[in-house]
Amino acid sequence: MSLPLRCLFGAGLLRSLATLPPRAQDEGHQSLKGLPKRRERTGLVGLRPPCSLCSRERDGNPAPIRRDDDGNEFGASVGVGHAYLLPSEGRAGSLPDTSRDVPSAGSRLRSVTASGAPACGSIGLLLRQRRSSLEYREAATEPESPRSAEQTKQVLSPRHRLGRPVPQRVLVLRALQLGDLLCAVPALRALRAALPEAEVTLLGLPWARSFVQRFDRYLDGFIEFPGYPGLPERPVELASIPSFLASVQRLRFDLVLQMHGNGSLINPLAVLLAGRVTAGYHVPGAYCPDPDRFLPYPQGLHEIHRHLSLMTFLGVPDRGDGLEFPLDASDRMRLAEIPGAARLRRGSYVCIHPGARAAERRWSPERFGELGDRLAARGLTVVLTGSPAERDLASGVARSMKSRPVNLTGRTDLGALAALLADARLLICNDTGVSHVAAALRVPSVVVFTASETRRWAPLDRTLHRVVPPTAARDVERAWSEVTRLLASRTADVA
């Protein structure tokens, strides 16, 4: 039994886990299946590469030929990728869909599923791809250029707390949603600047695989989080936890960063990941794995600054608190393919995003609809956005409006939604992940807070982004006044 598995679960629970039926051999990589095959793109001709170790055919299809930007063939035999050999619990699954989230320069995506599969008896597949000829448009930051010798020097404090030798393999535990991860980007940027040659892997929820692809300048790999007793982010897969822990322990990370929360529930799991050094947050008086490397959870800080404070505590210099959201040509291409989206002209429309994961954080559809009608009266097109699960909310907004909005709810993925926002005159939304996308893209927004903490989650730039606090959330006029101020300032900027 992997140390310290028994100390967390106890003998009784371990016996219960042992009696659960074993998973099918290939279940570990099912989260990679069902994804569309890659569309042919510059620099990526093949559709489904073979296993990078054995070049075996996959799904009965011959292993394709792949070519680089210069037309040269390459494949497993010349080291395009390699697999980490860990528990033999499955075979290689399909690769992530690069037609949806195309990795940028020097991308390294290692995908590991919750039960510790795939890739011909391995836990994951590390993809190393050459830069495509696609040009990447990055909001708020310039595209990454090759690091100079000066840039690759570590900028760690001489008294840093990351352990010695300096870690080369880092695991970041943050199994949360879009807004939570975007608020951690400044800390990840600081970590990358301090450890430019380290391999940084995210342990996150299944959706975050695409986040790692998009932010591959800071993240190199992904491990799927199987859930954990007491955490609400996803139902726990008890049968997968022992193999998951054993698999991660075999990876022997130099540093595990617990950035998931205050540590009251998650710190025992962070220790079980068996990093050479483990660091993060703890609640004073509660279990603290290492007082030298666990920061008392800072209260009263913005979420961005909370994670930067952890970096500072560990000896990692701050690299700014600005958010980022890289966009590339494929995001705009997918947006243009959506009926009704192609005719939208830059600056001529306002996005209304009425959804939020928690019902208590949602403003009423009728209030959004009233703002929509006022915007339409000013000659602006109203575009409704949201996830497929939020179609009913958007329909409620549309029904409450006298004017007719363009309803794109459920028709955009994250990249296409960001491309839509990038050209919008304004965003009106609840406190949810899309507000942080707008902040990263520097798109003006009015964010309505009905239940959450403005001090923790509101955009930092209060000139570009206006906040309606919970005390005024019932007041449509307050929200409208913020909208008109932003529209006036935006018009002046354009003029």
Image (cartoon, grey):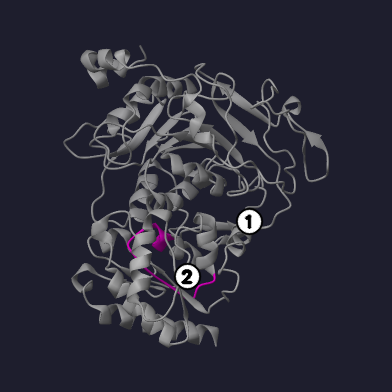
How many numbered marks, from 0 up? 2
Quadrant in which the N terminus appears = top left
Instruction: Tell me where residue 111 appears, x and y as whole percent.
Output: 53, 33
What residue did someone put label 1 on?
330
Q: Which residues are magenta?
A: 423-436
280 shown above or below 444: above
Q: Residue at x 54, y 34 (%)?
A: 33
Q: Residue at x 39, y 16 (%)?
A: 22
190 shown above or below 432: above
Q: Is residue 178 magenta?
A: no
Nearest the camera: 484 or 197?
A: 484
Nearest the camera: 190 or 415?
A: 415
Instruction: Tell me where residue 448 appears, x and y as whole percent.
Output: 30, 68
Kind of residue sitting beneath label 1: Ser
User: Left of 393 or right of it: where is 158?
Assistant: right
310 shown above or below 447: above
**Would residue 294 be visible to someone looking at this image?**
yes
Kind of residue sitting beneath label 2: Val
Nearest the camera: 471 or 250?
A: 471
The kind of secondary structure element at disc 1 is helix
Outermost residue to the right: 71
What residue did someone put label 2 on?
443
Instruction: Tell me where residue 201 appears, x and y as whole percent.
Output: 49, 36
Quadrant in which the C terminus appears = bottom right
Q: Quadrant of residue 274?
A: top left
Q: Quadrant of residue 391?
A: bottom left
